[in-house]
Image (cartoon, coloured by chain):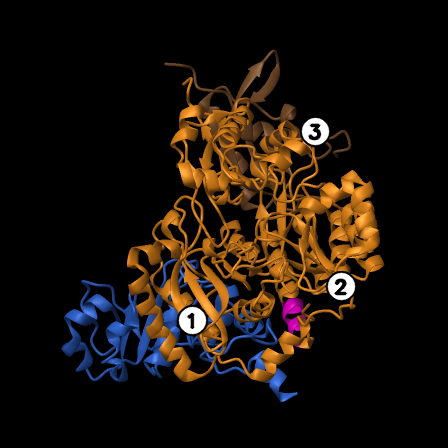
Chain colours: A brown, B orange, C blue
Amino acid sequence: MAAPSPQMITANRLRDGEVVWWNAGRWVTALAEGEVYTDPKAADAALEASLAYARNNTVVNPYLFDVRVEKGVIKPVKEREIIRALGPSVRTDTGKQAATHV
Amino acid sequence: MYRYDEFDAQMVKDRVDQFRFQVERRLKGELTEDEFKPLRLKNGLYLQLHSYMLRIAVPYGTLSQKQMRMLAHIARKYDKGYGHFTTRTNMQFHWPKLVDVPAILADLATVEMHCIQTSGNCVRNVTADHFAGAAADEIEDPRVLSEIVRQWSTFHPEFNYLPRKFKVGITGSATDRAAVKFHDIGIEIVKNDQGEVGYRVYVGGGMGRTPYVALLIGEFVSKEDILAYLEAVLRVYNEFGRRDNLWKARVKILTNALGAEEMRRQVEVEFREIKASGVLQLPEKEMARIEKYFAPPDFETLPDSDPEFEAACARDKDFADWVKTNIHPHRQTGYAIATVSLKAPGMTPGDISAVQMDGLAQIMDDFGHAEIRVSHEQNMVLPHVRKKDLPRLFARLKALDLGTANAGLVTDIICCPGLDYCDLANARSIPIAMAIQERFADLRRQHDLGELKIKISGCINACGHHHAGHIGILGVDKKGVELYQILLGGSGAEDASIGEILGHAFGAHEIVDAVENVVGTYVDLRKDGERLLDTVRRTGVAPFKERLYADR
Amino acid sequence: MPIVKGGKFVDDAFVTVPDGEPLPQGAPVIVTLARFKQERETLLGSGKPLGVRLKSSESPEALKDDLPRIALVALEFPIFRDGRGFSWARMLRTRLGYKGEIRAVGHFLYDQLAFLVRVGFDAFEVRQDFRTEDFERAMREMHYVYQPSVDGRRTIIAERMKE
């Protein structure tokens, strides 16, 4: 049986819709700073912990998604999560990929 | 165009206050996300991939200069300097913050704009013909009825929690420029044998997972009866539309399950009751009041041909090309309708920058245009342009990158935001549109191909109207890979038809070649000035399929 | 659960009896449509006010002949999104001329109250944390209405015709 894919947790911030990732108790705004879970049990426990921030109205709908880690660089498996991490592929002057993004 | 009276203005103001209160409660946690979601959707606020998305209503696609400037202001102040016009002629902003939305709505209210019912399971923005009031073949300006329907449907107490969304489209002429037969209710303004103006009411059109062309339910509904008739359709739908399955919840499913005859019968039962009560009969005074707002502007008496215009056509090839496709005949001599293309090479189809919006507002001011239109094909239209102004207008548009001479041509592509923006999407659509535009950039080739409507959707929800494309492209996801299916022979006009899927999907690197292949088959098979659509209808899809999959 | 009627908390005069449970002696009851159909004579002949509870899929047409003898119709909202109850209330008031209590039960939101009142609901089974100030506020949120409805409220068109 193949090893399960490493996973991360993501959500959108309630106030402004910003895409965020979970890292041990806090939300970060860059994919590279998010925590990667190689153990499914740890992933589930982290998701459970992150849900507290949905209940306290900080974020909306946290969920787990699959990633690969190649040479220390995190790469989402699905195109959708790649796009969420960067911004629209057709407007590279917008989103997190833009040099001006805060 | 319509101007709010104190009552319309108060309605919008009340909604702004109501939504502000809803946002406060959400941020405090007094509303859960599940409870808040339908409320924010009723104000056009989605949560998408990167951010929230706010959909602003552009009732029957008409905007004033002040409204254009306000949209530019919102793009700059609250967003990233651009917006996107949709296939329902609404404006979408991709980057608003939830905490800013009450302020955005308050700003919009100052220019008689709002986001009311642009999403959610309610009656949505009523769309009409972008040539309304200008087209020679028009029986009556469809925007009068559109405004009446807008008011009747806004905050309707009985129909705000329908099984699913409900879209109304209205055409004022036999030439359907509003794709009404793909709407939940499509209305065609007609004249009966006595010369009276009335309405043909079609019910149950739609795209998405199960596309349908609407069925004729109301053969001739009079002006005094139309609201009662619409109320009857909505009532039957609210009571009996399916609620067990999201994909079977539109009125098209109910209508086709019952059949036209039974649907008509049930509607007639409700209609007779409502008509007998008289409550929805519009007073003549109110009808006249609304009609006045859509009276034609004071046209000048002008000759049919203008020397400046003719000279410009002769000496300026770019201008002549633009006139060929982007200028349309006007009912008033000496005037023209101008399509302002939002499909420039390298730009997202339907996107418009704050600079362009302000530029258009200035053009409207300088040329004395009271209004501008948005079409469901994601272009804009200046409906009443004096022919003699066309050369100067073109120069101004070109300077704003709004002068692309491709209206109705293969590069005039309709395209949803797709996976670059949208939470529902399976695949990206915009890069495909751009790649096709690049491949077919040669204008002479575009002219040779003639009218060729390509429509691209990034998922089955069909916001790109791919079912109604002469060539339709549907983005799908197979095991994490973005693939594209080709459909042929769809049309959103009065000859409405649903495109047929040709076969296996293509990868992103193959799809443009595949489109080339289909176009090549058309060029080889066409006769006597046929468009691609006409050739497909004559030969069927078989020859296209054969050539497309020859080496598979 | 608390009942709000006329903008105030009121005692629930009825006992809602689930299917299969015996009817309590002496108390006015609310029963399901299914039970009403089965025990119609007994229920109508009990001498006590009677309530019938309809699921969102059940049209009040089923009660049309008995309405004069039914004191209360409870219309269920399984989830706030299921808006059939709005049409059923309208049908009860308008087509069927019903004058008894129409009570909204189940899952509905504060933000639906104004519409519910417009189409003919006059009582609401609410959550424990409901405040009557919220009800008052909901009634005040929209100054005007575009459409005629059961409540007979003057429409914007009527306002315009006045001028």
Q: Residue tagged by mark 1?
A: B220
Quadrant of the rendered image containing residue B313: top right
Q: Magenta part of the protein: which range?
A: B7-14
Quadrant including the N terminus of chain B: bottom right
Secondary structure at numbered mark 2: loop
Distance from disc 1 to disc 2, alpha carbons, whole Å, reads 34 Å
Parent chain of label 3? A
Where A42 falls versus B230 (above or below)? above
Parent chain of label 2? B
Quadrant of the rendered image containing residue C34: bottom left
Q: Examine the structure image and report whether residue B131 is included in the region drawn in magenta.
A: no
Q: Is residue C34 left or right of residue B136?
A: left
Parent chain of label 1? B
Query: What residue lies at 79% left-to-right and 47% top-to-bottom?
Result: B394
Q: Residue tagged by mark 3?
A: A97
Q: Is residue C60 left or right of residue B533?
A: left
Q: Residue tagged by mark 2?
A: B370
